[in-house]
Image: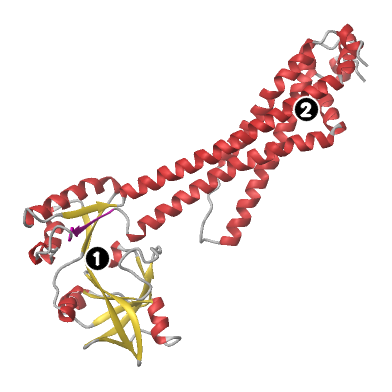
């Protein structure tokens, strides 16, 4: 069994070492399985951490951009001003559209709580006066009927859109389009229903129960003729910082020096979410690496045990002509096989988990499988296993035949 023989009889040193390694692992299945378990966990953790981190990051960005992509938005700082002339006006909106070249779409909004009366039922809702580009900027999805057209914005037609939730609350299973809703002395005809393209969970002017009307009707409802928010959209995210600064400068130049305007964008929020996601992934990857180091320590311990247990065998192989390099290669091969098998099982497990969760969650939270992470999850645990297995393999190779044969 231990004769090297010629390459034609026993194969190359690599094949011979692989055969000895496989026989050794097969003889100690339980110890090898327990050692492999930590590698499985660490390898699977690498794939899952990257997938979860990428998914979480993209999901957070989707939520942040739910109020619209590439946006800057302006509001009056009401803590420093109560003067009506400081309010954002349709003239400000027009000036931003005409004087800032980066603007691709712009919309103003005014929202106020109202109590509706629909078919004898009282319903609390949010009335939002809007201008034409609001649908594009806020990524609204028309679920029935249609959006407001130019004539309705210009001629102050008493038309409105309502959220799907409000349509269900007010009209039940009956179609909302074509019905009339009333708040106070004001009546409007429902021409469509809508929902947000990406839910903002009430963190914007769009609530569960919201009515959209042409901004020109706001003055008829409560006498106000100013915007609470002006949204401006750039073509690319790279133009947003300059757009933000230009909006702020333009608004300040059109109003009193004492007036203060808050002009912000979503870039800082997205950057913050990216930093949080990076920190989250770093922590989880550190845990995965720690698990792999523990696995490597386990591999080293079992290899030391194998060397001690098989010292007589090593001495006999050396006495029959095996070189030190072949002994070292055999034990390194064992470490490689244990760690590589664990890495493969871990990757397969992680992919199976991702496929199961994706099938279960559907398109709600699409998980992103990174093939780079898969390659890393195969290479890193295998490398750690071989690295930790080198010392026991080197010790085995250094044994003198005569000393090894004395040990029974």
Residue 83 location, x and y as percent?
9, 64
Q: Distance between the residues labelled 2 and 1?
A: 68 Å
**Residue pictured at 29% horizontal, 53% vertical:** 70
Q: Point out the image quarter for the C terminus.
A: top right
Mark 2, residues whose alpha carbon is within 10 Å: few (<14), some, or many (≥20)?
some
The answer to whether residue 80 is above or below residue 346 is below
Q: Nearer the viewer, residue 109 or 272?
A: 272
Q: Point out the image quarter for the N terminus.
A: top right
Any part of residue 179 in sight: no
Residue 273 location, x and y as percent?
40, 48
Do callouts 2 and 1 mark residues in contact (Cβ within 8 Å)?
A: no
Q: Is residue 282 left or right of residue 296?
A: left
Residue 115 location, x and y as percent?
30, 82
Q: Which residue is identified by label 1? A: 133
Please tell me whether residue 72 belongs to the stretch shown in magenta.
yes
Rendered image: mark on residue 302 = 2
Q: Which of marks 2 and 1 is in front?
A: 2
Which secondary structure type mostly characterizes the magenta part of the structure?
strand
Residue 265 location, x and y as percent?
27, 52
Please tell me whether residue 214 belongs to the stretch shown in magenta.
no
Q: Quadrant location of residue 156?
A: bottom left
**Residue pictured at 79% horizontal, 11% vertical:** 324
User: Under tag 2, what secondary structure?
Assistant: helix
Q: Magenta residues, as a range? A: 71-78
**Residue pictured at 75% horizontal, 24% vertical:** 333
Q: Quadrant location of residue 228?
A: bottom left
């Amino acid at each position: 069994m231990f004769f090297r023989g010629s390459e034609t009889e026993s194969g190359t040193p690599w094949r011979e070492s692989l055969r000895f390694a496989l026989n050794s692992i097969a003889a100690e299945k339980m110890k090898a399985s327990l050692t492999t378990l930590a590698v499985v966990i660490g390898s699977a953790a690498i794939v899952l951490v990257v997938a979860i981190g990428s998914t979480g990051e993209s999901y957070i960005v989707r939520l942040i951009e739910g109020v619209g992509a590439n946006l800057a938005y302006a509001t009056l700082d009401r803590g420093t001003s109560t003067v009506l002339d400081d309010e954002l006006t349709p003239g400000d909106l027009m000036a931003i559209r005409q004087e800032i070249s980066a603007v691709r779409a712009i919309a103003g909004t005014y929202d106020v709580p109202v109590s509706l009366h629909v078919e004898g039922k009282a319903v609390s809702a949010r009335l939002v006066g809007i201008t034409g580009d609001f649908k594009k900027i806020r990524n609204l999805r028309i679920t029935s009927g249609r959006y407001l057209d130019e004539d309705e914005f210009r001629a102050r037609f008493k038309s409105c859109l309502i959220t799907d939730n409000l349509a269900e609350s007010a009209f039940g299973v009956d179609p909302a389009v074509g019905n009339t809703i009333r708040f106070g002395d004001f009546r409007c005809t429902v021409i469509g229903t809508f929902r947000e393209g990406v839910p903002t969970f009430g963190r914007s002017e769009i609530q569960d129960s919201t009515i959209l009307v042409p901004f020109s009707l706001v003055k008829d409802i409560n006498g106000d003729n100013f915007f609470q928010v002006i949204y401006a959209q750039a073509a690319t995210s790279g133009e947003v910082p300059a757009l933000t600064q230009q909006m702020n400068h333009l608004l300040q130049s059109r109003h009193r020096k004492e007036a203060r305007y808050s002009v912000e964008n979503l870039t800082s929020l997205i950057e913050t979410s990216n930093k949080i996601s990076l920190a989250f992934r770093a922590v989880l990857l550190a845990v995965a690496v720690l698990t792999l180091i523990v696995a490597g320590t386990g591999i080293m311990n079992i290899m030391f045990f194998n060397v001690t247990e098989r010292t007589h065998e090593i001495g006999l192989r050396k006495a029959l002509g095996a070189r030190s390099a072949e002994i070292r290669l055999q034990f390194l091969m064992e470490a490689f096989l244990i760690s590589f098998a664990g890495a493969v099982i871990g990757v397969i497990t992680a992919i199976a988990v991702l496929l199961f969760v994706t099938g279960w969650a559907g398109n709600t939270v699409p998980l992103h499988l990174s093939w780079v992470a898969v390659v890393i999850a195969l290479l890193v645990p295998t490398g750690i296993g071989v690295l930790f297995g080198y010392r026991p393999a080197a010790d085995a190779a250094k044994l003198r035949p005569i000393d090894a044969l004395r040990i029974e």
